[in-house]
Amino acid sequence: MDIAAQLILNAIIAGAIYSLLALGFNLLYSTARFFDLGYGAMSVAGAYVAYTFYNLLDLSVPIAVLAGVLAAGTLGFVVEKLVYRPLRARKATHTVLLIASLGVLIVIQAVISIIFSSQFKILSKDVNLEPVFNVFGGAITQTQVIILVAALLIMVALALTLKYTLFGKAVNAIADDEEVARVVGVNSERVIGVVFFVGSAIGGAAGIATAFDSGIYPTIGLPLLLNGVIAFIVGGVGNVYGAVLGAFALAITENAAAWFLPGEWKFAIAFLVLIIFLIFRPQGILPK
Amino acid sequence: MNTKSKAVVGIVAVLLLIAGWWILGVQGTPEGKGPIKIGASLPLTGEAASYGEMTKPGIDLAVREINDSGGIEGRPIEIVYEDDKCSSEGGSSAFNKLVAVDKVAAVIGPVCSVAASAALPIAQKSGVPTLIIASAPGLTKIGDYIFRVYPSDSLQGKFAAEYVFNTLGKHAVAILYVKNDWGEGLKDTFNRRFTELGGTVTLSEGIVQGRTDVRTELTKIKASSPQLIYIPLQPDSGVAVAKQAKALGINAPLFGGDFFDTKEFTTPSETAGILFTIGKFNNPEEFKARIKSETGADSAILTPLGYDALKVFAYVIGEAGIDPQAMQRELSDLSYTDGESQPLISFDKDGDLEAAQFEVRVVKSGKSEPFEK
C-alpha cells in the first residue's frame, strides 16, 4: 500500500511541475502561435536568478523566488520585444520564429554556463531540517507541498484571469484570430508583450520549483521544455485545465511505467504518450 | 545568387582553405627542434571540472621543474590543455585537435571514462602514447598505446563489493547506477563479486546521466528492502539521490564510487555521512607544499597523478626519444619508482597499473576524509 501511495505522490509532485511548464507554454503558444523553444531558457534563467539570491546572497526564500519569477518574466518580455516582434513585423513564418527561438535557448543557456559554470546546482540549505509529511504511508516534503499548492493556485488564477478580465478576453480574442482581434480594437502587440511576461514568469516558477526539488544545470531547459510541450499537447492546445490534466496524465504514466520498466525508459515513455495522442487524439484529453 | 556574389563566396572559400592549410602547416612541430608538445585532455568545465582542476597543478609543476632544469635534451616541454567537458563529443574533439592540429607527442587524460571511450580510438589510430586517469575497465583494451595511471574500475567494483560484504557486513544491497561506461563498469564488477561472496542484489536500476528525479527508482529500491544502496552515480544524480532518499525515509546507507570526491557532491548538507571508494594514492606533505608555493593550488587526490604522468612521459622521452613506437615499448617495460603518487608505476599487458590500492572515504562537513569503521 505505501508503495502505491508513494508512487502516486511522486507522480503528483512531477505533475505539479509539468503543469506549470505546460501552463506557461500554453499561454505563449495560444497568442504567439509558434513553438517557442526559448521558453525552456526562461525557466532556467529564473532558477539561476533565484539561486543567486538564495544561495549566494543569502536572502530569504520568498525574495529569491519573487526575484527569479520576475527575472524570467522580464527576460521573456525583452526577448519578445528584441527578437520575435521584429520577425513578426517582417511577416516571418512560424519556422523562422521556431529557429530564432532555438537560438534564444542556446544563447541564454550559454550565457548561464559562462556566469555560473555548467555544474549542477541545488537550491536548498539543510534538508535535515525540512519537515516531511506522511500521506497514506508515502512521504512528501514541505517544499513539494508548497510547489503543489503554488501550481494549483497559479492554474486557478490563470483560468480566472483568462475568463473574467479584459486582458483575458483580449488574449482569447487573439488566440481565436489575431487579425479580427486587431480590427475590433485589441492592441495585439501590447497583449502579446504582457503574455510573454506572464508566460515566461510561470516558466520561471517551474524552473525554480525544479531547482528546489531536484536541482538544475544550464542545459536543463530543453528537458523541461519537452515535458511542458508534451503535457500541453496531451492536454489539448489552448486549454488551461487540459494543460494541467495533461501534465498529471504524463506524470502518472511515467511513474507507473517506471514501476514495471527500468527507469531509463522514462523519457521514451513520455514521447510514446505524445505520439499516441498526436495520432489518435490530436485535440487533446478533453472533448472540444 | 548573382555572379558577383558567387565570385565573393568563391574567394572567401579559397581564403579559408589557405588559412586552414597555413594554420595546420605552421602548428605542426618538426622533429628535433623546438619544444616537445604534450597534450592534456581534462574536464575544465562542467560537472567534473573539479577533476581537471585537481590534475592541472600537478602537470604544471612537473612542466615547470623539467623546463627549469633545461628540458629534455635541451628541448623544453610545452603543454597543450584541451577541455573535454567530461563528454564523448568533448573527448573526441579534444583528441582530434591535439593529434591533428597540435601534433602532440603524447597525451595525458582523459580523466572521465565517457570522454575517454570516444577519444582513445583516435590516439590509438594515430599512434600517440596516452596515459589515462579514466577508470572504466574496457578502456585500456582499446589498444597498446593506451596506459593507465589510475586503477581500473574492475578492481574498484570488486574492492567495493568486498568492503560492503566483509567490513560493513551488509549482505543484501540494491544498486542504482548511471548508464555510461563508468557506471556500468562499476555495477558489473560489484555485482559479480558481491554475488560470488554470497550476497544478494535486491534490485539493480540504471538511470541516464543527468537525471535528477529519481523518486520512482528509490521507491522501488525501498520496497526491495536492501541493507545498503550502492550508487555509482555522478555528482548531480548523487546529490539528488541523497536528498530524495532522505525525503522518502530510506534508512539504508548509501555507498558510492570515486566520482563523489568533488565539492559539487560534498558541499550540499544532504550528502554528509555518505561513503565512497576511490583510488588510494600518496600525497606527501612536501609535495603539497611545493604545489602550493609553485602554483597556488591545494594538492588533491589527482594532483600527484597529473605530476607523475608528466614526469613518466619526460622519463620515457628522455630514454626513447619522441618516436611513438619506441615510447610505446618503453612504457610497456616501465618500472618507474620516482613517483609522488605511488611507489611503483608499472603496467601489465593491457596497460593497467600492476599495483593498485583503494580506500573508503566519507563525506564530512563539506569535505571528504578517510573512513575508519
Image (cartoon, grey):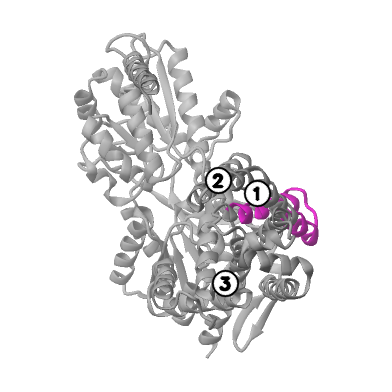
Q: In which quarter of the image is the N terminus of chain B?
A: top left
| Residue that carries the numbered disc 3 in the rendered image | A14
In 3D space, how far apart are the residues under numbered discs 1 and 3 (Cα atoms)?
29 Å
SS assignment at label 1: helix
Closer to the chain start, of discs 2 and 1, is 1
> Residue at point 70% right, 51% down?
A77
The stretch of residues the image draws in magenta is: A41-69
Q: Do labels 1 and 3 share a chain?
A: yes
Q: Which mark is residue A80?
A: 1
In 3D space, how far apart are the residues under numbered discs 3 and 2 (Cα atoms)?
24 Å
Q: Residue A118 carries which label?
A: 2
In 3D space, how far apart are the residues under numbered discs 2 and 1 (Cα atoms)?
26 Å
Q: Do labels 2 and 1 share a chain?
A: yes
Amino acid residing under circle 3: Ala
Q: Main secondary structure of the magenta part?
A: helix
| Label 2 chain ID | A
Assess whether mark 1 and mark 2 are in contact (beta carbons under 8 angstroms). no
Amino acid residing under circle 2: Ser
In this view, the residue in front, B211 or B203, is B211
Amino acid residing under circle 1: Glu
> Residue at point 44% right, 29% down?
B81
Does the magenta segment cover residue B123? no
